[in-house]
Image (cartoon, rainbow, N blue to C red):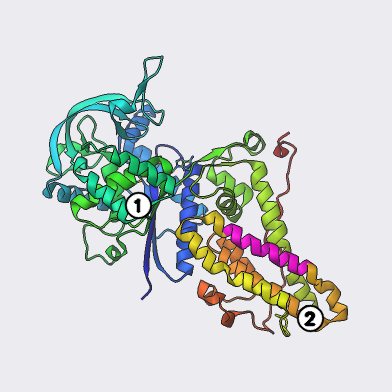
Amino acid sequence: MSQRFYITTAISYPNGKPHIGHAYEALATDAIARFKRLDGYDVRFLTGTDEHGLKMDKTAREAGMTPAELADQNAPQFEKMVEVLGCSNDDFIRTTEERHHKASQAIWQRMQDAGYIYKDSYAGWYSVRDEAYYGDEETHLKDDGVRFGPHGTPVEWVEEESYFFRLSAFQDRLLKHYTDNPSFIGPDERRNEVMKFVEGGLKDLSISRTTFNWGIKVPGDDAHVMYVWVDALTNYITGLGFPDESDPRWQYWPADLHVIGKDIVRFHTVYWPAFLMSAGIALPKRVFGHGFLFNKGEKMSKSIGNVIDPFTMVDHYGRDQVRYFFLREVPFGRDGNYSHEAIVGRINADLANDLGNLAQRSLSMIGKNCDGKVPVPGELSADDRALLVSADALLGRARVAIDKQELHAMLTSIWSVVADANRYFAAQEPWALKKTDPARMATVLWVTAETIRKIALLVQPVMPDSAGKLLDALSVTSESRQFADLDAESALKAGTNLPKPTPIFPRYVEDDKAGQGA
Ligand code: ME8
């Protein structure tokens, strides 16, 4: 029975169309989910939309529609986005679904039954954009008389009857949990911030509102709707059939990894574990806060329109190219920039030149000189073995990187072997061996093709389509594409027929002057 692995993204507010930040989170999470599946885990991957709350309510009213209409208009775009990005999610949750209302009311009831919810009145600051309550000391007044919260969004004064969650009772338990489980929050910078925040003391949290009704009703008190974060965080267990713990999906809890952005780490590492502790539910194993993406390329929008739209971006550069670019270019966990030039640079250098040309040149030589069959290797030289050994070391390094969500580090290791393979190919000069030593040529081509097989297996999580085409070009059957097939037993078999090679990673060619940023 293989080990389970449950991974989630944040659920996005569908108060507008999906943007590249949403796409980034989804594709990174997908790459991890695919990696684990290929590595033999029984993976469940959940994503979705967070449809309640004041932000949705306000945006809808401003647009002259109901929040339900706004959600119905935009949520399908998010569903479409994950499909266009090639995400392998098993489910897509919308928090307006009946199953989610049930789950949210059930967890509330458990929190209440355990004595952690009480009714009082709230008076304080609220940011609609952040959907967050702030203490007086966290806000500041600007010259124009508008008050802002710590993330630079305007806050408004709220005074109303509210249910409260006894967050203050969890300070010690949370700190102990962080200390006992050092990998609970990643990266370390985020962990330090959270620990400092909790060490500073926790106030009870207002968890219901009466002044609007776009939310999930508090059990037994229809005048109140739940604070949107109580319902939003619960999505992670709704997706596993909660509260029906006999549902087979419940076996995936606790989650192995919640992937979220750095702006919502506090909700996931303070509120969520406290809610779960109060309800007697196990805590997720790890929460990772990735960085933010910024568009540094003014030129980009001039050349091809609004490329911060993920649909346009995938359409323009290609799905795998976009996936590769973001995961390679931006160290996961740090902020990053993107620009047309940077994307084209990666596409042409890393993909078209380094991996694409190597595959095309070696496979064409095999096509022409080895009768279109996997060549017969002779005895391996030290150089041959060195290249194969460096490719063999990749899986171990990739596992370590993935378990720390260092997707960029995994790709850097893989591309260092791509570089080794290019150096090897250039140094061995198989085109010259053709006349002088055809048997040696066959060995060099076999070693190169076998190295490409290993690289293709390992890049599947990031570039599923292109890696699939590379493996097709090597006649690797669909049953032999797991990481377990990286072993020597699954190596390319001499004599296997190979299809006529076609280029897999096209060069990006600027189609107009504006595209060059003129
Ligand atoms: O926060 N770069 O929804 P959301 C990278 N509904 N990531 C970004 C980003 C950017 N420029 N902008 C946003 C919410 N994100 C809540 C989550 S989870 C129970 C509820 C990330 O639509 C952001 O950090 O504002 C978050 O992880 C995700 O996109 C959804 O953001």
On residue 217, the disc is none
Crowding near the residue tagged with mark 1, few <14, some 14–19, many ≥20 C-alpha atoms within 10 Å = many
Q: Is residue 163 above or below residue 23?
A: above
- Name the residue tied to disc 2: 440
Residue 219 at x, y = what percent? 15, 44
**Residue 458 visible at all:** yes
240 or 70: which is nearer to us?
A: 240
User: What residue type is disc 1 on?
Assistant: Ile
Q: Which residue occupies 54% across, 46% down?
A: 311
**Residue 65 visible at all:** no
For label 1, the SS is strand
Name the chief secondary structure element in magenta: helix
User: What residue type is disc 2 on?
Assistant: Arg
Q: Tally the numbered discs.
A: 2
In the picture, which quadrant includes the N terminus? bottom left
Q: Residue furthest top?
A: 144
- Name the residue tied to disc 1: 93
Residue 27 at x, y = what percent? 50, 53
On screen, residue 408 versus residue 405, left or right, reads: right
Q: Is residue 55 above or below residue 409?
A: above
For label 2, the SS is helix
* Quadrant of picture, ligand 1: top left
In the picture, which quadrant includes the C terminus? top right
Residue 283 quadrant: bottom left
Residue 221 quadrant: top left
**Magenta-colored stretch includes residue 418:** yes
Residue 228 at x, y = what percent? 28, 40
Q: What distance separates the C-alpha of mark 1 from that of mark 2?
A: 56 Å
On screen, residue 266 versus residue 108, left or right, reads: right
**N-terminal-most mark, 1 or 2:** 1
> Which segment did they paint magenta?
411-426
